[in-house]
């Protein structure tokens, strides 16, 4: 079984809809991250969390919110989706000063 | 100017060729990461290094801290090496936890 899972894997939604992307991990890591990837751009950090009570904005947090429900779960919400939020979204985990482990990605299309 | 620059952006080579992908960065770093993104989208961490050289199978990563430069080499390249290779750095000002990514090098190995 995958250590980092994301649901859904693909989602098509309409402008103005609320949508939640979910991430779960079985690695026991404290640190979790949400990134988005756009063609021609590097991965960009949306939000990150170092533990359940510690949530921080990344470089592109506007239009997004997150919830760390438990050590193993970190959800990303788009309160009112817009077309320029169409992207590939990745969740990642880390045990500290070490490599990050990525989920399989969620391809989101906002029409 | 991006803090992390990769070259080339695209690389096509024949099976068996020796491959070099370069990464330059403009600031002091805690560590440098090489990641592989498969055609299906999944991202896997290949190396994390802060000095010297690391080897895993046919892959070799080197870093020169003074020159702020890293290279990823692939020996005896194979079509299954076709992927996007991403360089990322950990920056001390973000507590060594957050990564800043390059835009990736798309490698295609022709049989």
Image (tube, rainbow, N blue to C red):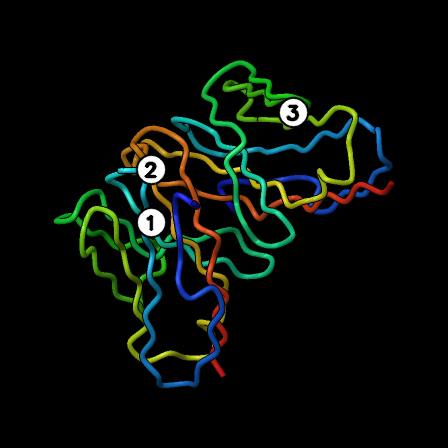
- Judged from this view, the residue extending furthest toward the left is A53
Residue B73, image x, y percentages: 68, 26
Label at residue A94: 2
Chain of the residue on which disc 3 is drawn: B
Figure check: B25 above or below B38: above
- Judged from this view, the residue extending furthest toward the front is A1
- Judged from this view, the residue extending furthest toward the top is B52
Which mark is first along the chain, 1 or 2? 1
Figure check: B25 above or below B73: below
- How would you rate the neighbour count of disc 3 (Cα within 10 Å): few for under 14, some for 14-19, many for 20 or more? some
Label at residue A10: none
On screen, residue B111 versus residue A75, left or right, reads right
> Marks 2 and 1: CB-CB under 8 Å?
yes
Residue A16, image x, y percentages: 36, 85
- How would you rate the neighbour count of disc 2 (Cα within 10 Å): few for under 14, some for 14-19, many for 20 or more? some
Q: Please tell me which residue is depicted at 67% across the width and 39% down the height of the picture.
A: B7
| Quadrant housing the N terminus of chain A | top left
Q: Please tell me which residue is depicted at 57% across the width and 26% down the height of the picture.
A: B69
Q: Please tell me which residue is depicted at 22% across the width and 52% down the height of the picture.
A: A56
| Residue occupied by mark 1 | A33
Chain of the residue on which disc 2 is drawn: A
Label at residue B59: 3
For this rendering, which residue is in front, B82 or B66? B82
């Amino acid at each position: 079984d995958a250590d980092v899972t994301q649901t859904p894997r693909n989602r098509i939604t309409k402008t103005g809809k609320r949508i939640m992307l979910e991430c779960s991990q079985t690695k026991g890591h404290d640190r979790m991250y949400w990134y988005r990837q756009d063609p021609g751009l590097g991965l960009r950090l949306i939000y990150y969390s170092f533990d359940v009570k510690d949530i921080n904005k990344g470089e592109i947090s506007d239009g997004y919110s997150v919830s760390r429900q438990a050590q193993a779960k970190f959800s990303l919400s788009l309160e009112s989706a817009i077309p320029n939020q169409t992207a590939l979204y990745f969740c990642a985990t880390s045990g500290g000063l070490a490599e990050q482990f990525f989920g399989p990605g969620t391809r989101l299309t906002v029409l | 100017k991006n803090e992390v620059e990769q070259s080339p952006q695209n690389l096509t080579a024949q099976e068996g060729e020796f491959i070099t992908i370069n990464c330059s960065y403009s600031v002091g770093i805690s560590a440098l990461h090489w990641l592989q993104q498969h055609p299906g989208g999944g991202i896997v961490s290949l190396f994390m290094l802060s000095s010297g050289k690391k080897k895993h199978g046919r892959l070799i990563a080197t870093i020169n801290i003074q020159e702020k430069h890293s290279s990823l080499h692939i020996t005896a390249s194979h079509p299954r090496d076709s992927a996007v290779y991403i360089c990322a750095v950990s920056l001390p000002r973000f507590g060594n936890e957050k990564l800043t990514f390059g835009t990736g090098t798309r490698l295609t190995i022709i049989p």
